[in-house]
């Protein structure tokens, strides 16, 4: 359902809980998280050494993955 991408060091995650468990492996890195559901988006994050997840672009604010990725994906344009 989600794919963490980091320059070939990628990981598939079945759900948000699994994503949250594995994202700490990327501490100190910039990653993208691909929402593989229909209409899903690509999100860009920085994971701090201490495991805090922030938006890579825009405000750079701290992100709660469950809130952000738990939202239904946008409808696909036809």
Image (spheres, grey):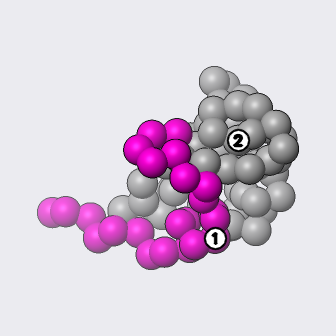
Q: Residue at x 45, y 40 (%)?
A: 57
Disc 1 crowd, CA 10 A, few/some/many (<14, 14-19, 20+): few
Tag on residue 58? none
Q: Which mark is residue 66?
A: 1
Q: Give the range drawn in magenta.
A: 56-78
Predominant SS of the magenta segment: loop
Please tell me whether mark 2 sits on a helix, a strand or a loop: strand
Residue 21 falls left or right of residue 46:
right
Is residue 26 one of those drawn in magenta? no
Residue depicted at 15% across the width and 63% down the height: 78
Res 2 seen here: no
Q: Nearer the viewer, mark 1 or mark 2?
A: 2
The residue that appears at 48% across and 63% down in the rendered structure is 37
Quarter assignment of residue 4: top right
The one nearer the camera, 74 or 24, is: 24
N-terminal-most mark, 1 or 2: 2
Camera-side residue of 67 and 32: 67
Say the numbered circle drawn on residue 47: 2
* 67 over 65 or under it: above or below: below
Q: Are marks 1 and 2 in contact (CB under 8 Å)?
A: no
Residue 69 is left or right of residue 4, and the answer is left
């Amino acid at each position: 359902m989600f794919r963490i991408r980091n320059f070939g060091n990628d990981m598939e995650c079945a759900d948000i809980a699994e994503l949250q468990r594995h994202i700490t492996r990327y501490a100190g890195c910039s990653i993208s998280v691909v929402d593989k559901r229909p209409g899903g988006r690509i999100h860009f994050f920085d994971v701090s050494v201490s495991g805090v997840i922030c938006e890579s672009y825009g405000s750079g604010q701290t992100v709660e993955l469950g809130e952000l990725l738990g939202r239904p994906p946008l409808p696909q344009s036809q």
